[in-house]
Image: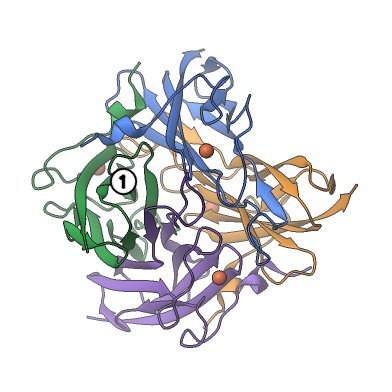
Chain colours: A green, B purple, C orange, D blue
Amino acid sequence: MKEFGELFQSADWKQEKHSPVIDGPDSVKKGDFANYSVSVGKEIPHPNTTEHHIRWIEIYFLPEGAKFPFQVARFDYTAHGESTEGANQGPVYTSPYSCFTVKLEKPGVFYATSYCNIHGLWKSEKAISLHD
Amino acid sequence: MKEFGELFQSADWKQEKHSPVIDGPDSVKKGDFANYSVSVGKEIPHPNTTEHHIRWIEIYFLPEGAKFPFQVARFDYTAHGESTEGANQGPVYTSPYSCFTVKLEKPGVFYATSYCNIHGLWKSEKAISLHD
Amino acid sequence: MKEFGELFQSADWKQEKHSPVIDGPDSVKKGDFANYSVSVGKEIPHPNTTEHHIRWIEIYFLPEGAKFPFQVARFDYTAHGESTEGANQGPVYTSPYSCFTVKLEKPGVFYATSYCNIHGLWKSEKAISLHD
Amino acid sequence: MKEFGELFQSADWKQEKHSPVIDGPDSVKKGDFANYSVSVGKEIPHPNTTEHHIRWIEIYFLPEGAKFPFQVARFDYTAHGESTEGANQGPVYTSPYSCFTVKLEKPGVFYATSYCNIHGLWKSEKAISLHD
Ligand SMILES: [Fe+3]
Ligand SMILES: [Fe+3]
Ligand SMILES: [Fe+3]
Ligand SMILES: [Fe+3]
């Protein structure tokens, strides 16, 4: 039986349309708000149809030396062309691109996870250092 | 007994720190991606503590003349200083600010709803027209 | 422009497959845990396909005489037959039926809201009294 | 840098109050609905306070021999005694206990994941076989 952690796939986002990418500063000022964005399909767009789409992205933060991660945010993308007139006939589609604003008191690592409704769980990470 | 719809409060965001604000174009090109942002506390910051914070913002779209709204996105803000060392001692805080990218095939209205864990449900809206 | 609260539909659950139904005791002991369930399509099952399904149910509680409601729970139903082999070829479907366990310190009203991905927002409510 | 999958802790639920437990049949009839429950703190209750509580449980399903898991459900527990009168003075608390109803077309493994707002991510799993 596979471990749950083994179900997260990862790959170079420049070549794989499912990999989440965290963009933003590598170093931020301690206790100040900093802006980041996260997206799936940054280089190669992922399909966005009623039958096949990116459902969500989550962000976690593991402080340096800490045992437990904190969930920072969760972004659900919920409109993919569904309609009473049939699949892909709807008036609105949401893209898997989000931004988030965080205040950090410690350095650590951001983890992004994402879910394609037919291609499963994906992950990436980005280390953040602090300065005064 | 109050109707559920009556539980959503609204107020001028310039004077009320709980009102969600949708920012972005009033008119977008049909079938093209457009960028919006949504925030709570844009003018007067809302507290962000373990005991009192903005938990989420949701976006809905009601096409012009349509009966049923579509949920566009949901943004959960999940880090508010909680820690094994006690409330407000934690290393990370998430602000209630998000962006979203949507493709519209019809004009209509965006509704933003938000939730403060002690001050309940809030709402605002923004009409969107389309051009070729 | 319609108010957001007007977008929630309601109907007799015995005749309407979208109406959420809260089942459980009308009166509970103050400060004790009590069990409830909530479902959509209790009498007339709602379709569960990749293109058309119940996405979530939420529960809120408005204490008697209070101004602000509290969100109690949110249940996302995320598997609806999607598959790499095409819509409705997948191995798993989740039904819109959930249970929840709550401890109440005040009487009040539970509100259930639910969302069909093509037929929008629905609601119902159930008053709860307390006894010693 | 730790892999994201390494952040999920596991332990015997009879001795560890954070471990999610999936209860229900080991074998179900193919294509029929089956009922399961999932809980955290089944043997040793986890605290439920404004500062420290179980935030959510998620369920995934990996079909036998498949590469990609499917998300089955997500349960958010959102009331933990928060109040305008201060932490733990509120009227409602939600317990980390949920049930789910699923229809399976293939055998496989259910994974439960859960999140304590200060003690991080946890997991467990349960294999399911099918019969006619
Ligand atoms: Fe995909
Ligand atoms: Fe507030
Ligand atoms: Fe429907
Ligand atoms: Fe804990």
Number of numbered discs visible in the structure rendering: 1
Q: Quadrant of the N terminus of chain D?
A: top left
Percent x, y of residue D25 = 57, 17
Does the numbered disc 1 mark a residue whose Cβ is under 8 Å from ligand 4? no
Q: Nearer the viewer, residue D71 or A128?
A: A128
Residue drawn 18% across and 58% down? A27
Q: Is residue B11 above or below residue D126?
A: below
Which residue in the protein does label 1 denote? Answer: A63
* Of residues A114 and B64, the one drawn nearer to the viewer in this rendering: A114
Q: Is residue C48 above or below residue A59?
A: above
Q: Residue reaching furthest left?
A: A15
C8 to the left or right of C108: left
In the rendered image, the residue lying farthest to the right is: C132
For the point 43% across and 58% down, which residue is it? B77
Q: Position of residue D20 (x, y in %)?
A: 52, 29
Residue C46 or residue B72, whichever sits in front? B72
User: Dot 1: within a 10 Å radius of its alpha carbon, few (fewer than 14), some, or many (20 or more) residues?
Assistant: many
The answer to whether residue C74 is left or right of residue C100 is left
Local secondary structure at mark 1: strand
Residue A11 in picture, x, y percent from top left: 14, 38
